[in-house]
Image (cartoon, rainbow, N blue to C red):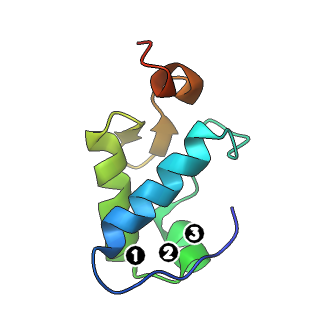
Amino acid sequence: MTGTTFERRNIAHQLADELQRRLTEADVPRRRLPSVREIASLYRVSPNTANAAVRLLAQRNMVRVLPRRGAFIAVSCDEQSHGVA
């Protein structure tokens, strides 16, 4: 994942959309997402914004958040992008 700068409005939603796009394109070679701090650093946002984006991905059923362990890809993003559960 490479760093990208976002506009001020709806930053968490924009970041969640970007992360989701990368997940569905299989740009993430591992099953675990980077930490919230790593995401914040990569995308130059606050840790709170990065955390909100990860929570949005969890609400979209893209990732599963395990306390103290991190966020993991919930299902094959290819399956989810094609509506297969």
Circle number at residue 38: 3
Q: Amino acid at mark 2?
A: Ala
Name the residue that disc number 2 marks: 40
Could one spot residue 32 in this view of the protein? no
Please give left or right for residue 30 compared with residue 15 in the image: right
Residue 45 image position (x, y, % from top left): 45, 81
Q: Position of residue 47 (x, y in %)?
A: 40, 75
Are the residues tagged 2 and 1 within 8 Å (C-beta)?
A: yes
- The residue where tag 1 is placed is 47
Q: Nearer the viewer, residue 56 or 14?
A: 14
Q: Amino acid at mark 3?
A: Glu
Q: Is residue 81 left or right of residue 25?
A: left
Marks 3/2 in contact by CB < 8 Å: the verdict is yes
Which residue occupies 55% across, 76% down? 43
Percent across and percent down for residue 74 are 45, 29
Check the picture and name the quadrant holding the N terminus: bottom right
